[in-house]
Amino acid sequence: MKLESITLREIRMPLVTPFETSFGRVSNRRMLLVESKVDGATGWGESVAGEGPFYAPETVETAWHVLRDFIWPILKDRKFNSASEIWELLAPIRGHNMAKGAIESAIWDAEAKQKSLPLWKLLRGVRQEISCGVSIGIKESLEELAATVERELAAGYQRIKIKIKPGNDIEPVEHLRQRFPNIRLMVDANSAYRLDDWAHLKRLEAYYLMMIEQPLGWDDLYSHAELQRKLDTPICLDECIHTDEHARAAIELGACRIINIKLGRVGGYTPARQIHDRCESKQIPVWCGGMLESGIGRAHNIALSTLSNFSLPGDVTASRRYWTEDVIDPEVEVTRQGTIRVPDGPGIGYAPRLDRIEKLTARKEILS
Ligand code: OSB
Ligand code: MG
């Protein structure tokens, strides 16, 4: 196989409602899409880098720079046998996983299309329907939060995750537990606490949460191990797990009992599957996180979620929760049971809407 060209596009899309986490609020998403041509087949990927370096060190700008100036020169004219070799070819570049994940996933899509196979089958996925939960941002009031939860439950979603931060944690959790005693509930702090806050975090244990996601420092495995020893509730790591080595360390240190896998955070399908397989062998369940993706990234998250150890509902949801109109056809839809039926078409199984993508494009560069 040979990569003939890549097209980088930055698209801008306003969110249906602003999304607030402990590290900030986003109303307009900027997303970098990668279109790759491999032996005549076209594959699509999305970089999940944010507008600023607040979730992870990368941004839309750094991803663009690294794709154009470092990744493209390595991959152009390079022969490879399958997309599974791309990750290793990019090993000389340290970090920049979101840039790597965007192109790596695009090449997987192209390979699947070339073989007329759904991507999830090429990846060794085992399920045709995935379970969905929702991630709900920090809200102005408890009433607004409860109304949002009510709506998502009515839509069928199987578990509720709310964002928390210091000063906005115990109260919303207590309120939701009183109102919805039996739902599967969890929280995500996006690194807003310090180990010193452990006694405060322990108060959350009164509300039987499924897990507490990423309470401490974005790269601080050791403190999470100390915290996990003090808590009965499982810690789930997100930000901390950017390599398979970090996953290994986290598991061996006892820093978490669950891992959230995001394609972009770990650099693509090859590392995502390594982490998935490692967790499976250690009986650590995983689920697929989300990064407010357009339909392209959403489609990839669906394919990833078909792997066997994705045994907990993920943050992969219907297009309409975030976008008035998505960039794929059909849009991602969720059943009344809170599941997504995995498409059976070749590649990601959703067609990019080129007309709409072109309209949303703020800049574009073709490398060939
Ligand atoms: O921590 O999972 C996170 C969104 C942006 C950055 C980080 C996170 C999130 C979400 C949203 O929780 C998940 C989604 O795409 O629905
Ligand atoms: Mg998270």
Image (spheres, rainbow, N blue to C red):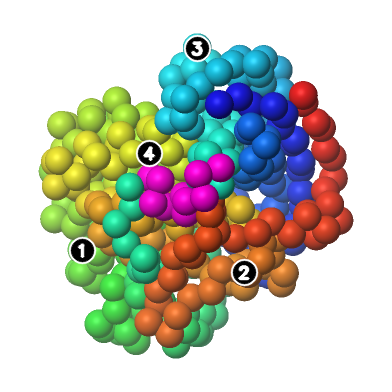
Q: Residue 156: which quarter of the image? A: bottom left
Amino acid type at image mark 1: Glu
**x, y (%) of residue 233?**
19, 57
Amino acid type at image mark 3: Pro
Query: In the image, is residue 186 above or below residue 21?
Result: below
Q: Is residue 115 magenta?
A: yes
Q: Is residue 358 left or right of residue 183?
A: right
Question: If you read the primary sequence from the N terminus, does the residue marked by circle 1 or circle 4 appear first?
Answer: 1
Which mark lies nearer to you, 1 or 2? 2
Q: Is residue 5 magenta?
A: no
Q: Residue at x 21, y 69 (%)?
A: 208
Residue contact between numbered discs 2 and 3, judged by CB atoms under 8 Å: no
- Which residue is label 1 attached to? 205
Question: If you read the primary sequence from the N terminus, does the residue marked by circle 1 or circle 3 appear first?
Answer: 3
- Which residue is label 3 attached to? 92
Cα distance between the residues tagged 1 and 4? 30 Å
Q: Is residue 156 left or right of residue 246?
A: right
Neighbourhood count class around disc 4 (C-alpha, 10 Å): few under 14, some 14–19, many 20 upward: many
Question: If you read the primary sequence from the N terminus, does the residue marked by circle 4 or circle 2 appear first?
Answer: 4
Question: If you read the primary sequence from the N terminus, does the residue marked by circle 3 or circle 4 appear first?
Answer: 3
- Which residue is label 2 attached to? 331
| Part of the protein shown in magenta | 114-123
Cα distance between the residues tagged 1 and 3? 44 Å
- Which residue is label 4 attached to? 272
Residue contact between numbered discs 1 and 3, judged by CB atoms under 8 Å: no
